[in-house]
Amino acid sequence: MEALLYKPIDRVTRSTLVLHDLLKHTPKDHPDFPLLQDALRISQNFLSSINEEIDPRRTAVTTPKGEARQLVKDGFLVEVSESSRKLRHVFLFTDLLLCAKMKKTAVGRHQQYECKWYIPLADLTFQTLDDSDSCPSIQVLPEHEIEEMKSKISALKSDIQKEKKAPKGQSRVERLRKKMNEQESWLLLHSYLFLLSSDYERSEWKESIQKLQKKDLQACVLSSVELQVLTSSCFKLRTVHNIPVTSNKDDEETPGLYGFLHVIVHSAKGFKESANLYCTLEVDSFGYFVSKAKTRVFRDTAEPQWNEEFEIELEGSQYLRILCYEKCYDKSMLNKDDNEIVDKIMGKGQVQLDPQTVQSKNWHMDVIEMNGIKVEFSMKFTSRDLSLKRTPSKKQSGVFGVKINVVTKRERSKVPYIVRQCIEEVEKRGIDEVGIYRISGVATDIQALKLAFDTNTKDILVMLSDMDINAIAGTLKLYFRELPEPLLTDRLYPAFMEGIALADPAAKENCMMHLLRSLPDPNLMTFLTLLEHLKRVAEKEPINKMSLHNLATVFGPTLLRPSESESTKGQHITSASDIWSHDVMAQVQVLLYYLQHPPITFAELKRNTLYFSTDV
């Protein structure tokens, strides 16, 4: 049987040797010479494709000219076709770009790719800004569906951990893993432009293609046989085997970090000439990267000294990326698709967030090298449990960490001064800022504002007008986060959780409105003021990219998360990944409910109090 199986291979081997000899003795100008060349190349590719033991993963196939077609880069991306999204594996070779999808194969058979399209690099051009009007409209799912899926994935992760400890839970673990893989794949597919969601990936692919295009490339047309051989070789050539979802990771792999990463961007060197320079910071979450912070623009310099600190929330993150840009003020560079000026990427790099390194109490200094540029930064990590503690202030004279009724009574106001001033400044000059309330402000600026409000500095209005708007937004978030009791109170927290879970719309409406009426007056007035402000921010979503759901995700846990004594009653947090647990998702949903509700006024709520006397 073994001899029979080897017979076809022996025959092809003998034919290859004969073809080799024929080519040696055939003049190059003979009409049969190119045909013999093609036949030899196909035979050689076939033999090398089955020779797994000698060459387990080849890096090239032979081109019609006898040159090596090298694989330069491969990875997953989403192809938008007829307004629908398809997951594709893209292979960049030295002379063409090939898009493939995995074929459905019977159990036990080798997996294979099917070619969807290919483009010779000689014919490939990048879309210019003038072409951006012709971009297809991409259907984006409502964000609440994305967040609901994240919640389901987190619940499945928790179930898998429980089943692992059960005596006969292994078979159920496999079923849960399969289900989680399906849900994570769905999440990646529908997260806005997944896997090319950041400038980092876009830049990597563009640089790789443009580098190859500098060579003298000729347009190539593949015959059906050549295309089939090339597509078949992709299975062995590929370097990226799985989409980056957590269900594809081994149990031994680190689950990532949950908590807050403090990063100081110090300086950069290596620029060839002076420019207006800034950096952005990205971290990965649920398999794709999100921009989390941005330094100031350091003008007209080749050695910027930012020395700015940021606090970045991590959700199972494993990498930190730093991108360095040159700020462009040229109006001709306006992107017609989203009305933004496109800045030039000068360099990019990433570091792995090693738990052993970053979890020490001391700052860890590091350098990222990118295109001859060196960016110096420091970082340290704080676990979620430590960073989200509500610690009452020992001094009652300030506003941070002081009960809201104490502050309003002292100020003789209905809403704390800090809340009114921060909201006013954001609405004055930050409502059009992309990522307002999501992008971190500089930590030192936030601490300066915190001190100014705590000491009631006379120059506070001047400070606010001069301060970066993300720092002001960060100060407002910090104020609510450091309240000794959440704005919506510890006492009512269980009722809010029950109310948002009600299925009947009328019952939910009655319950949620009654809960607002049950809040102390300073809490209610402050909440209603913030609510109307966030609605006004969301009205500018086409410009600032902050939807109601985005804002609910940022503020929900801050306004509702119970103080430590309340949150630990009857439960013990065993896993850091509860950041997307049902509790956190419910906190987001509570705020979203009020944000989506028609305008609510203090007077109307209090007028209706007479009709509702039943305890919650």
Image (spheres, helix red, strand yellow):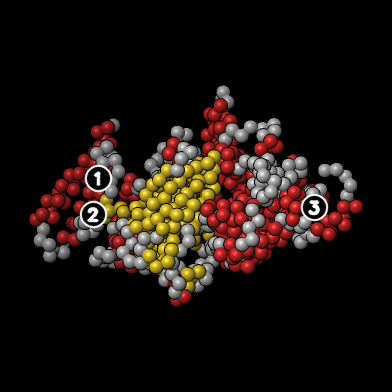
Secondary-structure class at tag 1: helix
Distance from disc 1 to disc 3, alpha carbons, whole Å, reads: 80 Å
Q: Nearer the viewer, residue 7 or 398?
A: 398
Q: Quadrant of the C terminus?
A: top right
Q: First in sequence, mark 3 or 2: give its number.
A: 2
Residue 341 horizontal/vertical position (percent): 47, 70
Residue 522's x, y, as percent?
77, 53
Q: Quadrant of residue 105?
A: top left
Looking at the rendered structure, the secondary structure element under dot 2 is strand
> Horizontal placement of 609 versus 146: left or right?
right
Q: Where does residue 608 sit, x and y in percent of width and height?
A: 87, 55
Q: Amino acid at mark 3?
A: Asp
Within 10 Å of disc 3 (Cα), the crowding (few <14, some 14-19, many 20+) is some
Residue under pointer 1: 47
- Residue at horizontal 56 percent and vertical 65 percent from the top: 466
Which amino acid, mark 1?
Leu
Residue at the spot of label 3: 521
Q: Is 477 left, or right, of 231 in this rendering?
A: right
460 with respect to 43 (left or right): right
**Helix, strand or loop under label 3:** helix
Q: Please state which of the two labelled residues, at mark 3 or mark 2, is closer to the viewer.
A: 3
Quote the CA–CA distance across marks 3 and 2. Answer: 75 Å
* Residue 231, horizontal then vertical, whole percent: 34, 52
Q: Is residue 206 visible?
A: no
Q: Residues within 10 Å of mark 1 (few under 14, many from 20)?
A: some
- Say if 428 sits above or below 291 in the image: below
